[in-house]
Image (cartoon, coloured by chain):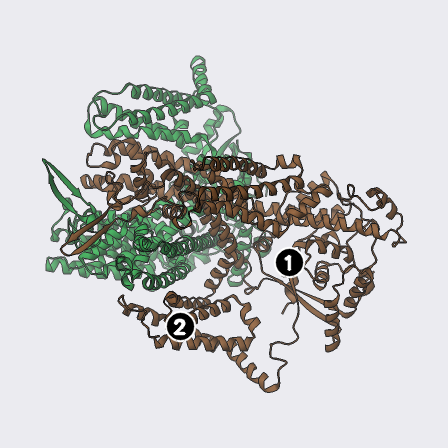
Chain colours: A green, B brown
Amino acid sequence: MRWREPPAIYLEDCGSPVERSSYLIQLPTADGGSYDVIHDASSPAAGDCCAQQSSARHNWEMNYQEAAIYLQEGENNDKFFTHPKNAKALAAYLFAHNHLFYLMELSTALLLLLLSLCEAPAVPMLRLGIFVHATLELFALMVVVFELSMKMRWLGFHTFIRHKRTMVKTCVLFVQFIEAIVVLVRQTSHVRITRALRCIFLVDCRYCGAVRRNLRQIFQSLPPFIDILLLLLFFMVIFAILGFYLFSPNHSDPYFSTLENSLVNLFVLLTTSNFPDVMMPSYARNPWSCVFFIVYLSIELYFIMNLLLAVVFDTFNDIEKRKFKSLLLHKRTAIQHAYRLLITKQRPSGISFKHFEGLLRFYKPRMCTRERYLTFKALNQSNTPLLSLKDFYNFYEVVGLKWKAKRNREHWFDDLPRTAFLIFKGINILVNSRVFQYTMYTVVAVNGIWILVETFMLQGGNFFSRNVPWSYIVFLTIYGVELLLKTTGLGPVEYLSSGWNLFDFSVTLFAFLGLMALAFNMEPFYFIVVLRPLQLLRLFKLKKRYRNVLDTMFELFPRMASLGLTLLIFYYCFAIVGMEFFAGVVYPNCCNTSTVADSYRWVNHTVGNKTVVEEGYYYLNNFDNILNSFVTLFELTVVNDWYIIMEGVTSQTTHWSRLYFMIFYIVTMVVMTIIVAFILEAFVFRMNYTRKNQDSEEDNGIVLEKEISKEEVVGIIELYKRSSAAPETSQLQKIVLQMDKYGQMSTTFLGRRSRTKSDLSMKMYEEEIQEWYEEHSRKEESQAPLQESAPASTSSLKPLSLRQRSQTVI
Amino acid sequence: MRWREPPAIYLEDCGSPVERSSYLIQLPTADGGSYDVIHDASSPAAGDCCAQQSSARHNWEMNYQEAAIYLQEGENNDKFFTHPKNAKALAAYLFAHNHLFYLMELSTALLLLLLSLCEAPAVPMLRLGIFVHATLELFALMVVVFELSMKMRWLGFHTFIRHKRTMVKTCVLFVQFIEAIVVLVRQTSHVRITRALRCIFLVDCRYCGAVRRNLRQIFQSLPPFIDILLLLLFFMVIFAILGFYLFSPNHSDPYFSTLENSLVNLFVLLTTSNFPDVMMPSYARNPWSCVFFIVYLSIELYFIMNLLLAVVFDTFNDIEKRKFKSLLLHKRTAIQHAYRLLITKQRPSGISFKHFEGLLRFYKPRMCTRERYLTFKALNQSNTPLLSLKDFYNFYEVVGLKWKAKRNREHWFDDLPRTAFLIFKGINILVNSRVFQYTMYTVVAVNGIWILVETFMLQGGNFFSRNVPWSYIVFLTIYGVELLLKTTGLGPVEYLSSGWNLFDFSVTLFAFLGLMALAFNMEPFYFIVVLRPLQLLRLFKLKKRYRNVLDTMFELFPRMASLGLTLLIFYYCFAIVGMEFFAGVVYPNCCNTSTVADSYRWVNHTVGNKTVVEEGYYYLNNFDNILNSFVTLFELTVVNDWYIIMEGVTSQTTHWSRLYFMIFYIVTMVVMTIIVAFILEAFVFRMNYTRKNQDSEEDNGIVLEKEISKEEVVGIIELYKRSSAAPETSQLQKIVLQMDKYGQMSTTFLGRRSRTKSDLSMKMYEEEIQEWYEEHSRKEESQAPLQESAPASTSSLKPLSLRQRSQTVI
């Protein structure tokens, strides 16, 4: 059957499916019959397909739905053992898988986390009565209970028990419940370290999948990390013993007086936080003692710490690749499952458009008919009316494309009258010219230098005068004119579609707001003025390396954000523990007996007439409420002078408190190393990719081109009309009208989406992917041979090379 | 001609070479004739090869020498344009290329560098009169002049001028000369910043080739580094302006009072060195101001700094690969050059053993005849008496092998009488048993815990009692017994051939020395006691990852040392500059007007009866002599609290001094990033290698096995006797005698060397190497076609897979 025969694709395909959806058996059908009845009734009647049409359609609808669920599971990397098994489970699954439910999950988790702002020790402004916050907590926990019960209904008891994360969540929920009730009954808060476990509710949210992946990656990197950490600690102990023997005879050296001091100080030295100081007493006595410290730092800091990074980086690379592989194969399996549900007994070699359309109705309900058909056509490589498994494998890459009719006119002003056209065309040429660009860069540079000089001339004081400086107005006018020219020259839509233009636009807008604030003397807005220098960032567009770096930065942003969130979750746990133990222990002049007394001093001298305040300020780095704790923890993360905070707290509590700080240091070291490894990996990967594809320099994501002829559109409209299932043919009819108007026989559509890391990986591991597929299909065959895929053809499959197909694109 | 016919290899091969050595033309020969005479005389006489034998031999000797020089140039990566072009140049080349000359070079350079210890500001103990050190300097410079004149003679004036490094050296030499004379005349030292350039004499030394490579690598990494650095500084400036606008209204905040302060403090903040402090005044006033600092640190420290590492790491990887490629191809060209000089017109398809032996006599004069023959046999893959170019390409891999007869006896005690044999055999089995090993590990672990507990119990004071602790004796006895058992069981040679055993041995020896010191009350040796914990390192043999890490560490050690030396050279330059400008500016109580006064304070309180000394110690971090400068620079490298040193010096000089410290920070940042990138690259490479070769887990370097039959040995002896050129046949005769004694017809020899980075790279880039070779030979052919290499055969060459050949090894 040839492609050019339009009627072929909208065959009235009501043959029975090869495989039946598992939900059908338990479904109470209208006539009370079981699936087998329907099945038996429809299967022999291959010719008279309208006989049992109503029940067959119901039958198919179920199949579409299950296939869509399989594809969703493939996309979300949900394991198939959580696949809903019957109609009851299906209902729960559908209930628990929509954005409303996800939002509820997320907001409950956030509510629980935010409660720590109001619970004692609370942020002063947000303090709530115990009764209030305990009730709120109970309410939130009730919601979690509801969510879990839905999940149990969907998963079934057995799977629920086997699902580790859910079980941990249930246990935590139970503990939290009891504690909340205890608090409510006793009307006073006890030591509730378990609050640190609240994070699990956030981690378990559907929207926090990236955080879960990060956590998994951190835990997977741990074994090699711990190995090297042990090496590090071993050398530390050896050097502590050595240092104790060498320096403890020197009584003016407080750092090595006991073995414990020796250990603690070498641990701090590892972070370099006490560096020259720890050496000084012994160095003053014998200059050669510096050798001990130089050797220690060279081994520990410059060698083993870098080794740690190397090991984590290596593990990270390895994990990334394996993760990508398993995700890829999981998706492939999902596609196979879905495929089996969509083929008919009559035509087992592929999926017809009708069934594909049915699947998409469940998988992406928002997609319009035109897009469904274009997706089908984009997938269909073989020019037959049926979609083979091989074609179907590219489902995930193609389904995300946004389709748009290829414009016939080049500019937005093409339809305008001649004079206007010429003016706009002139502006367009001007705006796109190099001269214009470089002039703007020069203006920005001059503005930058101007701001620098201007700021340099101000020596504090009255720089927020009531007068708007004229330079500000001049530059802003230039920017305004540029913005206007660009908007008119390129058209608003095209102008704002570039990220850099968007940036220009918002900075100019902010600067304008700043001007307004200045002009109308609105004090609170004065800080907008300081955003002006940001316009200088435009200068970085000039060099390719910067464009690359900034592009990569934007590409990485979601992942970076999730890593940041992961770090915040660790912060939260430590903040809760810190608050429970150290709230209120640090205050001005608290630590006069310790070695760091100076940093906590707060004295009000009176010298002559003037009052001199001597502030050590470190009492501000406390655990008095959760916001303060976060800042303190950030300071500990930055590591510099962290031992002052540690010693301050230690002097007010016991010396076991040091454990808290040391463990926190090690944990942040792990997370930070992972972050560094991630940034390294991402950039090195990207740079390798760029090096590998030097010819195709500029790529604006994935682009695909498809042509649709008029007959095809008419055919589809016919199909929809006949099935009378969907009344959404208006858009298609509009296309036909437009074609008629311009007298075209076909329209070309462009499908676009931005390039993801997965696409890059596809390209990078091209050869290996083939091996994985072969290995995977070999395994599959040995387990459960697929009827529709002949082994020989499966092994020669190639992943859809989108690059290759987008060659014909403008 | 078959291999098994022994006479074939020692053909009296006195045919004339295809190519003549370039030195012959100018050589004054005995009969006053030119090369052409000899050439013409010998070439037609292919049959009567003894006719012009003497001059032909002279002819060949020249060829051997030039070929050896080519191979040396290939090995040392000397460019061929420095190849000596005539006999005079050859003499100079030979003079300048031996270890005596190299040593002279090195010692002169070191003398010049060490002079800074004695020149004002000198290390007090080493101060010399101006007349003395200036004379010494002049003497050293004279030696350098001599070296340079030799080099000029070798290179010829034109090449000398074109050789950049040598020209720079000449200029520096000139400046130094003038300055030394000025100092001698004026009898007083002026500001001599140019002393910082003395490093160039060290860098130019033959032995410092690795340092030169490092420097080149650093300079090659600079362009991308500078790009990212600019991004970093740009954000710094923007944040400085922002910070100035935001925080300068707060008069209690000294950090942002002017734009300059703002910039300096944000630069210091980049190193985290002033972190919580710089935030505190504004944080105390408004808690939300911490956002400014968190954002700044997140962008600058956690993002851009890591980006810097990523970019350098990426560039580094790329450079490493390109360096490896160019080195490989350079060696290949060198081999081709040498090959052309060694083949004869009569037999242009390969090198006979006689000529190969002649080459080795010049290339490795210390090699004995047996090894020369084994090298020839190892290279000869084709089993013909001639060495083809394809075989000869493996020259560098094979020539480094150390050959040893494969032992017939397994243990050293095999020849002893029965009873002794049984005893030793028993010890051998015991020593090699798992139980023994784990027992020893347990003892070491117990000892470690013992030392820890013991040290923990000591609370300072008299722990170096006159009594030797009994635990010390017990453990030392156990270690002594173990050492004895192992030495007897394995034989001393085998015992000490393992690095770990050597380590055990030396630690035990040191511990024994410590015992002696304790027993004989020798006070100065007491510190040896503290080496005991090092024995714990043995525990790390247990885990594979540690063995890997430590092995890699040892493999990397030479490279690490050269990187360290490179850092020291930078230190030297900065130390000289620092001394010239800042010597003597910092002293106790020097900086009472600055913000860091406390750190420089030195006060003698009298509280009651006791004298309390309050020491800030930072005055010790000065530039008063070169050793102090080095320590100070190390402290600046570690970065923590470096601003205290900077501010101290700045308060005593001008605020331009900050430039010195900031530039030093940036330079060390570059070098440190390179070091980190190097360690990362090396370990990741190694781990990838290990992953790629998981099956061949244990490898002890490169091992090659070759069998030699008796006839062959006899044949070679014959050859030597006949040519009467070398009287070194005694070793060969010993082999024959030994074979006779044991009645063997052949002996097997093992060639060993340790695996180098180059071997690993060969393995890793296996496929790419083929492409490089093909590309290279294509280029070669287009430029100057080699007569002896048929293009088809060249392109199908494979690099010698040593792994493959060492399969047959025990």
Please state which of residues A273 and A803 is positioned toward the viewer in this rendering: A273
Say which quarter of the image contains residue A720.
top left
- What amino acid is found at the position of numbered circle 2 in the picture? Leu
Between marks 2 and 1, how big is the CA–CA gap? 42 Å
Q: Position of residue B329 (x, y in %)?
A: 64, 46
- Please give the label number shown on residue B400: 1
Judge left or right: residue B109 versus residue B438: right
Which residue corresponds to the image point at 26% horizontal and 48% vertical from the top-left?
Answer: B616
Residue that lies at the very extreme toward the bottom in this rendered image: B419
Q: Is residue A719 visible?
A: no
- Please give the label number shown on residue B515: 2
Q: Earlier in the sequence, mark 2 or mark 1?
A: 1
Please state which of residues B83 and B676 is positioned toward the viewer in this rendering: B83
Residue that lies at the very extreme toward the top in this rendered image: A419
Judge left or right: residue A410 versus residue A276: right
Q: Position of residue B518 (x, y in %)?
A: 37, 71
Judge left or right: residue A714 versus residue B164: left
What is the chain letter for disc 1? B
Which residue corresponds to the image point at 40% horizontal and 75% vertical from the top-left?
Answer: B475
Q: Nearer the viewer, mark 2 or mark 1?
A: 2
Dot 1 alpha-carbon crowd within 10 angstroms: few under 14, some 14 to 19, many 20 or more: few
